[in-house]
Image (cartoon, rainbow, N blue to C red):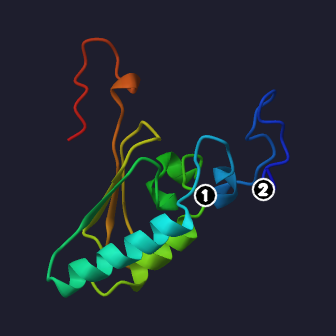
Amino acid sequence: QANNPNDITREDFARGLPDGPGKRWVPFNGSLGPEQLQWLRKELQAAHEGGERTILLSHVVLLPEATPGANCFALVWNYDEVLSIIRETRSPPVAAFCGHAHLFVHALDAVSGTHHVTLPSPLEVDFEEDASAI
C-alpha cells in the first residue's frame, strides 16, 4: 500500500496512479520474491553454461510494452529487477510468455532481444469465436 494510497477494498484502486509503470501498483499484480529472483538468475546462468536456449513463462507481464496499450496495468511490481536479470545474463531468454492482461500483445525488449508475448484469454472471446492463443 506504500505505492498506492487508495483503499483497495472500497474504491477504484487505480484512481490517481500515474500513467506508465506507476499504474502497476494494483493488488492483482504482485511481485517475484528474493528467492524467486535468485532462482531465475541461477537457472539462466546454468542454461547459458549448458548451451541451452530458454523461454520464460509467467502469469504476470514482465515488460511494460507487453501490457495492452503499454498501460502497465498488468505489470509485475518489480519488473525492473526481473528485466535486470534477463538483460544481464549472457544468453537472455528467447521469449517470455505471459497472461494476466487477457489480450494479445507482442513486444521486443530492445536491450536483451527477448520477445515478450502476452497471450489472450478465452474469457475475452465472444461466444462461438476461436479461443486459441497461438
The extreme top residue here reads: 127
Q: Look at label 2 and name its amino acid.
A: Asn
Q: Where on the picture, by quarter, is residue 6?
A: top right
Dot 2 crowding, Cα within 10 Å, few <14, some 14–19, many 20+:
few
**Residue 74 visible, this orientation:** yes
Q: Look at label 1 and name its amino acid.
A: Trp
Image location of residue 59, percent across then percent down: 42, 47
Determine whether the residue tagged by mark 2 lies in a helix, strand or loop: loop
Image location of residue 45, percent across then percent down: 30, 82
Viewer-closest of 20 and 34 = 34
Q: Is residue 14 left or right of residue 80?
A: right
**Residue 113 visible, this orientation:** no
Viewer-closest of 123 and 126 = 123
User: Which residue is identified by label 1?
Assistant: 77
Q: Can you say whether 19 is above or below 82 in the image?
A: above
Determine which of the numbered discs, if any, sits on residue 99 in the image.
none
Residue at the image point whose x is 25% and y is 12% from the top: 128
Looking at the rendered image, the quarter that the C terminus falls into is: top left
Q: State if disc 2 and disc 1 touch (CB < 8 Å).
A: yes
Determine which of the numbered discs, if any, sits on residue 3 in the image.
2
Residue at the image point whose x is 42% and y is 36% from the top: 102
